[in-house]
Amino acid sequence: MGRMLLLPSLGPFHILHPRYNAATVLAMLEEAQPEAVYLASHSEEALREGLWREEDPLLFHLLPWAEERGIPVVALDAEAHLKGEAEAFREALAQHPLGAPHLERMRAFDEALLDLLKTPLSPEVLGSEAFLSRLREAYQGFAEAFGEGPATGFRRRRMEGVRAALAGREGAVVAELLDYALLSQAFPQALPKAHVPTEKERERALLDRAWQLREEDDWGALLEGLFAIGSPEALYLAAQIYLAAGEWREALGLMEEVFRMDFQHPGYLPGYVLARFGQLLDLAGERDRALRAYRGVLALSYAPEEARAIALAGLRSPFRLQ
């Protein structure tokens, strides 16, 4: 096996980890300079059709990064369609009169995994034997209780296929967390190691924090940080803070500014920007412009579910503050 780097994708949970956010992954890839990036948990079809968008937001950052550098991204999960079997298995249990205790046990495994995902994670923690053994233990327990197959979405079988496809290749492999746990045994030399955070990672951590705005946060400090970054995403998030504080006119002023910028990246941003812009225009009594913004959301090739829901509601009746 040539030089390889194996990195886990935390899906929507990257946002919780300032030391392992989307920018951390890109910084580690930048250091590794891989000749290709392999996606262990996606199929070529999912990559082509954008089916990853709701489950793996990391790719909103990774794919443009690779494209900019001319690095090929290759999806290796030839049997990704089997992932749906795990969902079907749970649905079948839910229909069965004796299914309830089994579903309860499944939830306990989900909770154990969630607890792991909520502990502070960094590259060195993710690559440590302590973390990996807890992760494998959780997976093993589940596989023993419910069987390796439909219940696990045939995970072990699928990762065997990925491992075979990686034979003799060099590059970086990005895998969903439980897939990463299985592949880590095949490529122990490729695990992530300690890494010095970059300025981009610190900025991403601030943006991630603002996406999760909480009452107890220092909103003033967040705004200061967002204005210092000054990107369309940062200004959109600053507008969100103003709106949360009830200062919708300031929010609208900021959104007018974002609207004059190129707000195409990350790929989830255009939908959110147009949906929120529509609501703020409604508050300002500019119904025609608001309707154009809502229709703009629905005209996008992709908009997050939440943005589409806002747009559909806005088309039905003008947005009002509660």
Image (cartoon, rainbow, N blue to C red):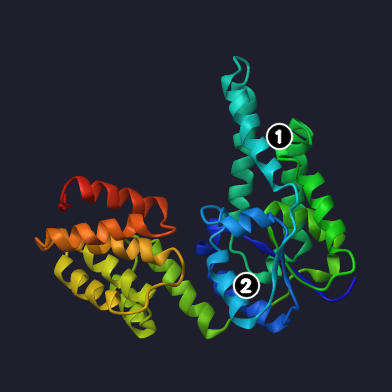
Residue 151 is marked as 1
Residue 90 located left or right of residue 139: left
The x, y position of residue 74, in whole percent, is 71, 65
Relative to residue 274, is residue 63 drawn left or right? right
Q: Which residue is drawn at 69% across and 66% down?
A: 125
At a point 34% along the width and 74% down the height, the residue shown is 222
Q: Please, what is the three-letter code of the amino acid marked with disc 1? A: Ala
Q: Of the numbered discs in the image, which one, if any, rests on residue 247?
A: none
- Residue with the mark numbered 2: 25
Q: Mark 2 falls on what kind of element?
A: helix
Q: Where is residue 7 in the image (x, y as percent from the top left)?
A: 70, 66
Q: Quadrant of residue 184?
A: bottom right
Front-lying residue, 254 or 194: 254
Q: Quadrant of residue 253?
A: bottom left
Neighbours of disc 1 within 10 Å: few (<14), some (14-19), many (20+): many
Query: Quadrant location of residue 248?
Result: bottom left
Q: Is residue 316 visible?
A: yes
Q: Residue at image x 40%, y 50%?
A: 305
